[in-house]
Amino acid sequence: MVDLAAVRSNVRRLRALAAPARLMAVVKADAYGHGAVPVARAVLEAGADALGVAHVGEALALRAAGIGAPVLAWLHTVDTDFGAALAADVELGVSGWELAPIAEAARALGSPARIHLKIDTGLGRNGATEALWPELVRAAAQAEAAGLVRVVGVFTHLAVADEPARPETREQLERFRGAVDTARAAGLRPALRHAANSPGLLGAAGLERPEDMLLDMVRVGVSLYGLSPFADRTPGELGLVPAMTLRSTVSAVKEVPAGQGVSYGLSYVTDRPTTLALVPLGYADGVPRTGTGGPVRIQGRTYPEVGRVAMDQIVVDLGAPGLAAPEHGLLGAEAVLFGAGEDPSASAWADAAGTINYEIVTRVSPRVPRVHLHATEHGVGAAEEQAAEEQAAEEQAAEEQAAEEQA
Ligand SMILES: *Cc1c(COP(=O)(O)O)cnc(C)c1O
């Protein structure tokens, strides 16, 4: 279940932090697993200025859904269809070699490509190296003079913004400023300088000069979805609301004696008579196989998943015998792995699996139906007023999901 009201609330919060800089909402990877098209519509409604994706194919899918807002795609291969991108008015990130085929595609189309030049200020991934940057800006200026491109932006990506105490972020921003100066000296007039990701934006207030981080635009992803990019800060502390709930229902309950092995490898063995609950979510649904011990909330209590995560199912030890009797109502009870507030959280699953919350939400597979809620509102004063509505919407979503599961 994806709460689009939470997404909208997060956008409003992030916009307030970024202002006067613009906000690009990063909806790559199917909006980090949340559904690119519904999320794109929600973020634009809430005031995002532009959308960002990795691949041209992702940008074209947004256009095909009728979304006309500015979209930037920044990660290309030699097979990327730049002509299709330009025909769909998609802006393109350029790190080097892409300039020539993009200019060629623009010549064929008869109108200039809108491009953002990318400099690698330290991350060591894409972006022109500092050594090649002067050459890239010179070539871009020539292509601009020839009417083939318009350099609307210059950008870079930060490596350690989630660790605010580290000095490299400031060094990256200094190098970036130098790169912008070089671009201007070559005659370019990029209106949009952008560097900050979610941790960059959320940490900007702690900097001596926040405007050096915020620049003209920020590109935020994980924080849109209500997740914290910092190891030691919760979404609530950042004013964010988690948008995704991953849940199912208990599909079987059984009484077992002490000494019962659980799941492949029998790596978990019960140490007393107990009740086991089966939840039909596994690694084919995106629950990490390495996530043994991750939390599952059932009937208001949080239990650890036990034994190996299988392809289709996980097992929860309810910790006491006698719970399989029908009066306990466990068969069919809701089982929440994360979301629906912060407990349990995607971050707890990330900790169990040795990864980050970004991966936990992004890897939820297509087998899990996405149910998008629109109705609830988050924010000051809204919570209580909307509680009843939220409850109703959740019940409806549960019904819809049940119907889908049966289908
Ligand atoms: C994914 C990505 C972002 C968003 O990062 P978050 O940490 O999720 O905010 C921004 N810029 C680039 C280039 C990215 O690849």
Image (cartoon, helix red, strand yellow):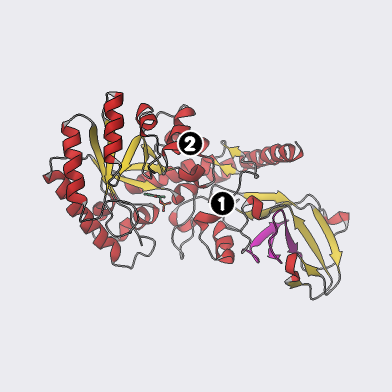
Q: Residue at x 66, y 53 (%)?
A: 336
Name the residue at 54% across, 60% down.
347
Q: Quadrant of residue 21?
A: top left
User: Crowdedness of circle 2 by 10 Å Cα count: few (<14), some, many (20+)?
Assistant: many
In this view, the residue in front, 165 or 309, is 309
Circle 2 — which element? Answer: helix
Q: Report if residue 189 is visible in the image.
A: no
Name the residue rendered at 57%, 36% in the picture. 375
Question: Does residue 14 appear anywhere in the picture?
Answer: yes
Is 3 located above or below residue 358 in the figure?
above
Q: In which quadrant of the rendered image does the C terminus lie? A: top right
Q: Is residue 189 above or below residue 251?
A: above
Which numbered disc, 2 or 1, marks the residue closer to the eye?
A: 1
Magenta region, residue range: 291-318
Is 320 in the magenta? no
Counting the numbered discs, the total is 2
Disc with the residue nearer the chain's start (2 vs 1): 2
Q: Amino acid at mark 1?
A: Arg
The CA span between labels 2 and 1 is 21 Å
Which one is nearer the viewer's eye here, 313 or 334? 313
Name the quarter where the N terminus is drawn: top right
Near mark 1 (Cα within 10 A), the count class, few <14, some 14-19 or many ≥20, is: some
Coordinates of residue 68 in the picture (x, y in percent):
40, 28
Q: Please give left or right for residue 273 compared with residue 184 in the image.
A: right
Residue that badge 2 annotates? 42
Task: Name the residue beneath numbered marker 1.
Answer: 363
Q: What amino acid type is highlighted by mark number 2?
A: Ala
Q: Is residue 11 placed above or below 202 in the rendered structure?
A: above
Percent of width and height locating residue 253: 82, 58
Kind of element beneath mark 1: loop
Residue 121: give x, y in percent of width and height: 27, 57
